[in-house]
Image (cartoon, rainbow, N blue to C red):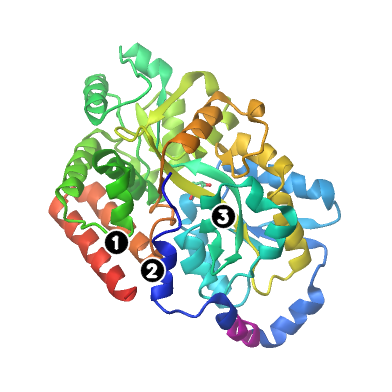
Amino acid sequence: MHDLSKGFASRASRRGVLKGGAALGLGALSLGKVGADRTLAQDSGTLEVFSWWTSPGEAPALQALFDAYSAKYPDVEIINAAVAGGAGVNAQAVLQTRLQGNQPPDSWQTHIGRELIDQYVVPGYCEPITDLYTGEGWADVMPEGLVEQATWESEQYSIPVGVHRGNGFWYNKQVMADNGIEVGDTMSVDEFFAAADTLKAAEIPALALAMKDTFPGAQTFENTLLGVVGPDTYIALFRGEAPWDDQGVRDAADAYAKMLDYVNEDFSALSWDQAFALIIEGKAGFNSMGDWAYGEVVAKNAQDNIGWVSHPGTNGSFVLVVDSFTLPVGAPNSENATNWLTILGSKEAQEAFNPLKGSIPARTDVNRDIFSPYHQWSMDSFANDALAPSCAHGQASSPAFKQAFYDASTAFVTDKDVDTYIAMLSDAAAMDAETTE
Ligand code: GAL
């Protein structure tokens, strides 16, 4: 297994930004009168939870967490402040505005790693929850690498609820059978193109793409990149330790450009779950998507007809997308929020949530038997494969590089201009290196 902590911690500390504690003093002062009122209002009967879980598969999974909380705290009213838009493309902007205006919810969803640390902890928006980790013994039941990515300067700042595998490649078994395509346990890039040509001849888009939320453009590239250059180079690239104008990156961009010749025409109008619905409905061949897609499979009862392999070339790697929740500085109902986090870290809540969400629990002491064959497959991959954090989901790189990665990928999906893509990524990496000097 790779050491997940290297890279982001050392780069962030090199930047010399004050840690949460110091910035926290400023935050508390600037709360002023509102802050005082908030203290009085603490632990009222509400709990506001902020996330982007609104799709047909995500919403019931979130509800399972609410139910686990309500079972213990029936008198607290939960306010679901979810903002639609896959990967938090809209939610994260709304949240920033609220945080800058000292209007935090009681808890928000974030990915561990760079997103948690750079976007929220270092600017002073999060309270440490180290006491909860100690009291609940979480570090004993979660993989060390996950706890490390929730840690900044020896304090923990969020509790992971589920571990998504970002490099899934999903297909409709009937569509494959009808077109004489046999999908094995793995798929190479060449095997994908052979299947894609068969589907094209049958006038079926081989790759369902969704650019309304923009993240699938970045995600499909990171998966393709991983498949072409392998996990070591992939990890080095996002850590700023390998050059983006490398031939391997160029080969990946070439392969991606070719894949884009097989996408659905309406990709710019579709959200990720709408594109995945094309797979469920048998209207497209494959979809490169994290396993929140399996949440859609569960919600639509489509288990029998949906198959999966790793994104072409990425067998043996697990792209990490780990969802977690925070305790904000100035949470209006901090006791309710603390209780919420305690529930999220429990075995019961993780066993209720993850079967619906498609992720595997962050806790490793769960009952494996209650999970689907997909989940068990993913658990095995997590245990045995190379772990590669996702940039499209904020874990692998700075927020600025992630944004540049999105922008470059969004342009590439339409213009397929490899030279410009490589140049944009190289420039973004150079700027990132300068700001972290
Ligand atoms: C990811 C998140 C997942 C899933 C997905 C699509 O960033 O980690 O839980 O919700 O976005 O919205």
Q: Is residue 388 magenta?
A: no
The residue carrying mark 1 has its beta carbon less than 8 Å from ligand 1? no
Q: Point out the tag, 2 or 3, that comes first from the N-terminus.
A: 2
Residue that carries the numbered disc 1 in the rendered image: 240
The image quarter containing residue 22 is bottom right
What type is the residue that disc 3 sits on?
Val
Q: Say whether residue 25 is visible.
A: yes
Q: Mark 2: which secondary structure?
A: helix
What type is the residue that disc 2 sits on?
Arg
Residue that carries the numbered disc 3 in the rendered image: 147
Residue that carries the numbered disc 2 in the rendered image: 11
Q: Point out the tag, 1 or 2, that comes first from the N-terminus.
A: 2
Q: Mark 1: which secondary structure?
A: loop
* Left or right of 49 on screen, residue 152: left
* Left or right of 347 on screen, residue 304: left
- Tell me where residue 21 appears, x and y as whole percent: 59, 79
Q: Which residue occupies 65% across, 49% down? A: 140
- Residue 231's place in the image compared with 369, above or below, is below
Q: Point out the tag, 3 or 1, that comes first from the N-terminus.
A: 3
* Left or right of 198 on screen, residue 112: right
Q: Which residues are magenta?
A: 24-30
Depth check, front residue: 382 or 58: 382
User: Which residue, as the protein is rendered here, is positioned at the far right?
Assistant: 75
